[in-house]
Structures are given as C-alpha cells and as structure tokens.
C-alpha cells in the first residue's frame, strides 16, 4: 500500500487566465496536493531527514504560484507537480487546482492532474544555461547557440537578450557579453556538461586556466536544472553565483521571471531586482 501525504485547501492569489480581466487582476485559486511517498523510514527513526519535508514543498509552491502569470490552469498545476517531484522521496503527485467563481452558475472550475516519477524521468529536462564571452564575444555567443541547436540531443527553446558586463575579478580585460539559454534535453546534468557543452567550448577555443576570471572565447555553465539541487564534481546546481551576480541573474530572469529558486525560494525576477546593476547594459535583443 502506498503512503500518502495530503496538503489540503491551500488558498492563494495569482494571475491565471486568458481574458483581459484575468490578466489584470489576481484571482483566488484553491490547491489540494496528494504526495505518494514511502514514509516507513521516518516512521521508525522520527528524524526529519528521513521524511518528505512538506513544509518546504508548500513554501516553494506558494512562492511560485503567487509570482506566476500563466495562461492555463493546466500549466500552473503541472508546475506545482514538478516542484513536488523535485523531492526524490516523492514517487507521485496529484494536484487539484480550482478557480472559485470562474464559471457562471458553478462554484468553481479546475483541473486534477497526476504526475509520477516515471513521468518526470521520461520528460525532457528543462535546463537554463549561462553563457559568457569576451573574446570576439558576439561571434562566439552566436556560434555556441548554433552548435547547441545542431546537437540532436538538445533542443534550444529560448534565448535571452545579451548584456554587456564589466569583468569580475580581473579588470584589465575586455568587457563580457552575457546571455542565457533555455534548452530541453534527455541528457542528465553531468552528461550535458561533459558532452555537448564541453565539446562546444573546445570547438570555440576555450582555454581553461587556474584563473577563473581570465578572458575566454566562451563559457557555458548549467545554472538551473529542472528544480533540482545537484553537485557535479566541484560545481553546484543551482549556480551559487546566480544569487550574487547580476550578469547571471538578469538574463535568466528575462527567460523565466517566475521560476522559483529551489534553495532560496525567490523568483528569478526577485533575485535580479535586488542585485546592483552597475556595469551591466542590454546590447542585443536576441541571439537567434
């Protein structure tokens, strides 16, 4: 028998809908979540480390929902399920999302969706990649996008505007151009970094040195991978510099302003807004 955790009658306000009034005014949504999880270890140990932390999941759902501006309740429900399944202890999530009073003569209208670990594992990963270059930067950024789009294991979904930024840590070098990409891929984070991203860096002449702030033809780093928290060698995902460096946060916020950072609970828009913008300016609207 499957153990279940219930989060009942979570009432929040958000923008969701397609007509003018729905886009201009926040509405109530009523959310119920059921999580399938094996709770036996927590039942024996009485330790939070063995349990699904439903408080953390609920906080992430609240932040995402209240900051979001989706058109469809189906999309909002799917994003809630993805947050729930970011916890590896959760085997499946059922989300019921209602809009009270949205339909004349009806108490509410809504959807109920079910997503499993298998659904998440089978679905393409949504990956946000930070890009930077200060050696022939516009040419190399465009080349990196073309090479990534040509890879049959990666789909480039969107590119951010390009920003000119002052160098960090080593002032006596050219300014950088920085941007971000959203891609879909069946590759895991480690395989993506060691495979296509590394191959593109090599093809474009990236020379790595002990000085991480040295000039470079191209830098391609995984900033966010679904809603996961990962360590790949010495690199941590989400990229720790996302919450401290505007040249990383601002392009990512352009792509996904309402994405909720899985560790801080902030949206990318909130992170970008609080960081100083000294030495950063938009230069190119789109790379592709």
Image (cartoon, grey):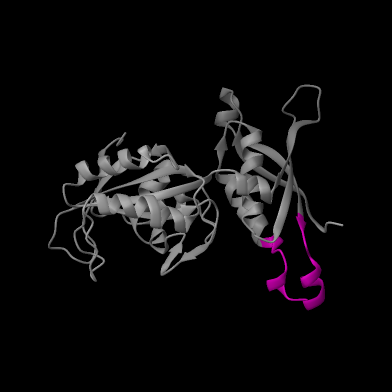
> For the point 65% across and 53% down, which residue is it?
85
**220 to the left or right of 237:** left
- Corner quadrant of residue 21: top right
**15 to the left or right of 199:** right
Q: Which residues are magenta?
A: 36-55
Q: Residue furthest left?
A: 172
- Corner quadrant of residue 254: top left
> For the point 28% across and 52% down, which residue is it?
132
Quarter holding the N terminus is: bottom right
Q: Position of residue 224 (x, y in %)?
A: 46, 53
Is 90 drawn above or below residue 283 in the view shown? below
Is 213 drawn above or below residue 198 in the view shown? below
Q: Position of residue 176 (x, y in %)?
A: 22, 52
Is 4 drawn above or below residue 15 in the view shown? below
- Residue 30 counted in the magenta span: no
> For the point 32% across and 33% down, which residue is it?
288
Is residue 142 something that shows in the picture? yes
Q: Position of residue 197 (x, y in %)?
A: 36, 52
């Amino acid at each position: 028998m499957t153990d279940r955790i219930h989060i009942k009658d979570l009432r929040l306000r958000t923008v969701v809908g397609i007509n003018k009034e729905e886009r201009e005014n926040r509405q109530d949504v009523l959310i119920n979540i059921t999580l399938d999880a094996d709770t036996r270890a927590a039942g024996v140990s009485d330790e939070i480390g063995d349990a699904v932390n439903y408080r953390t999941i609920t906080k992430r759902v609240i932040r995402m929902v209240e900051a979001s501006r989706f058109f469809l309740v189906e999309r909002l429900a799917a994003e809630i399920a993805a947050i729930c399944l970011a916890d590896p202890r959760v085997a499946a999530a059922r989300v019921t999302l209602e809009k009270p009073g949205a339909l004349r003569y009806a108490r509410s209208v809504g959807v109920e969706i079910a997503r499993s670990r298998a659904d998440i594992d089978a679905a393409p990963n949504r990956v946000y990649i930070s890009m930077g270059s200060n050696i022939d930067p516009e040419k190399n950024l465009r080349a990196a996008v073309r090479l990534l789009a040509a890879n049959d294991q990666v789909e480039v979904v969107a590119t951010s505007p390009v920003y000119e930024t002052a160098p960090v840590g080593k002032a006596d070098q050219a300014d950088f151009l920085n941007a971000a990409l959203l891609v879909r891929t069946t590759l895991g984070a480690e395989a993506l970094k060691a495979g296509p991203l590394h191959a593109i860096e090599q093809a474009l002449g990236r020379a790595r040195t002990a000085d991480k702030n040295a000039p470079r033809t191209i830098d391609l780093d995984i900033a966010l991978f679904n809603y996961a928290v990962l360590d790949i060698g010495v690199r941590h995902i989400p990229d720790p510099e996302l919450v401290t460096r505007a040249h990383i946060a601002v392009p990512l916020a352009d792509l996904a302003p309402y994405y909720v950072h899985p560790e801080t609970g902030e949206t990318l828009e909130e992170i970008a807004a609080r960081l100083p913008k000294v030495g950063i300016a938009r230069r190119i609207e789109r790379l592709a």
